[in-house]
Structure formats: structure tokens, C-alpha cells
Image (cartoon, rainbow, N blue to C red):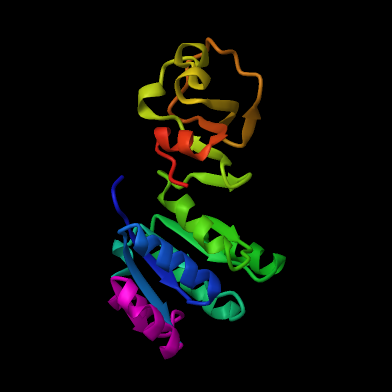
Amino acid sequence: MKKKEYGVFGLGKFGMAVALRLAEAGNSVVAVDSDPDRIDEIANNVTCAMVADIADPDVLENLGISNLDCVVVGVSTDMQASIMATIIAKEKGVPFIVSKAENEMHKHILEKVGADKIVFPEAEMGGRVARNLMGGDFVDLVELSSEFSMVEMPVPEGWIGKGLRELDVRGTYGLNIIGVKHGEVLEVNMNPENPLEKEMTLVIVGKNVNLAKVGVEI
């Protein structure tokens, strides 16, 4: 899997968990926070750690934000900083922006200014978001138990043009395709002879060890 370059802005429990998990997987991580103690705590574990105001466009420009594959805005209590960092990341052309929201109003504003994914995380959810980002084209993942998960993922290249019957995903991988999404429309009774298309999203349930066989990192 190709490693990506991430920026994590705001190192509370959520941002810290995301940054550490991404770095542990070998990705390049730029961590930014206004608290020197938090920067000291993470400095030895990430590519770059910097004390700075994430709402300052000049700071983010100097960080080379336009070269990042993804930015995670982990600040939520300082709504102005959260919104400004999201706007700046969008203006600089960051392909995927994840922003943490404090409430529904905050979520609505972040949607308006260009956040691609908005989360209301508990502390432990940071690790899950990091895994989702690394899952290949930003897979959505829900852990059903310590052994089973449900994922939404793009159609693997080798499956495009083939029907579910031909693929025999259950027999080959021990996985169950429970639905196919076309945009926001979910089809749960797809004709098994109809070929899968590149634009579709598969909804799959199975053991984590089997999901790994199709490129999903749990």
C-alpha cells in the first residue's frame, strides 16, 4: 500500500491518537498544535512536529500543506481555528479533509466550507479514523467486534466487469457482500450476474483476517 503524507492539526486525545497511528504505519505525518507540551510529547514519533497557530494561513503555507494527501483538523472547541484550518486546507487543494466537530452547528459550517468527512469522536475513535484513511481510497469501516468488521470500499480493480456469482467472494475470501452502493443509493438485492462497475461501492462484512485479503487494514 502506498504510504501517504498527512497533516494532523490539533493534538488533543483524538488528534494525538490519529497522528500516532498514522506514523506507526510508516506514513509521513506533520503534527501541529499551539501547546508546546503536546508537541514535545509527539515530536519523536512523527515526521515533523511544530508549535503554531493552525488558523494562520502563513503558517500552513510554510508547512507545504498543498503537498499533503490528507489533513485532519482535530480542533473542535476553538471553532474559529477549526473552521479557518479547514478553509485554508480546501483553498490549498488538499485532496481529503477530515474535521472534528463540536456540535451540529459546527458540523454544518464545516460541511459548507469544504470538509470531506466530519467526525464526533470519542478518544479511542482516533485510531479507527486513521485506519479508515489508510484503508485504500478512504474506506469507511465499522468494527462490529474484535474479530468482525463491516466496510464500505471501492470495487477492487480485478473485480470490475465481473458479477458476484463469478467472483464467489464468500467461497474465495470468506466474506459477505451485503450491498452495492451507486452514489448514495444502496442496493441490497443486486442481480449476481450483473457486472460490477468502477464507480460502485461495496458493503462487505467479514472477519478482519479475511478483509485483509482484499486490502482492508484493520
Q: In this view, does 145 lie above or below 42?
A: above
Residue drawn 66% across and 19% down? 189
Residue 60 within the segment the image draws in magenta: yes
Residue 191 quadrant: top right
Q: How many marks?
A: 0
Q: Name the foreground residue: 12 vs 170.
A: 170
Q: Is residue 215 above or below residue 175?
A: below
- Left of 20 or right of it: where is 179? right
Residue drawn 48% across and 77% down? 11
Residue 41 quadrant: bottom left
| Residue 90 visible to an observer of this rendering | no
Q: Name the foreground residue: 182 vs 17.
A: 17
| Residue 126 visible to an observer of this rendering | yes
Farthest-out residue, right:
104
- Left of 153 or right of it: where is 58? left
Q: Name the foreground residue: 104 vs 169.
A: 169
Residue 214 percent coordinates (x, y): 41, 33
Residue 100 percent coordinates (x, y): 57, 67
Q: Is residue 184 above or below residue 37?
A: above
**Segment tinted magenta in the rendering:** 35-63
Residue 129 percent coordinates (x, y): 51, 57
Residue 191 within the segment the image draws in magenta: no
Q: In this view, does 140 lie above or below 181?
A: below
Farthest-out residue, bottom:
36
Query: In the rendered image, which quarter contains the N terminus?
Result: top left
Residue drawn 53% across and 31% down? 202
Residue 156 percent coordinates (x, y): 40, 30
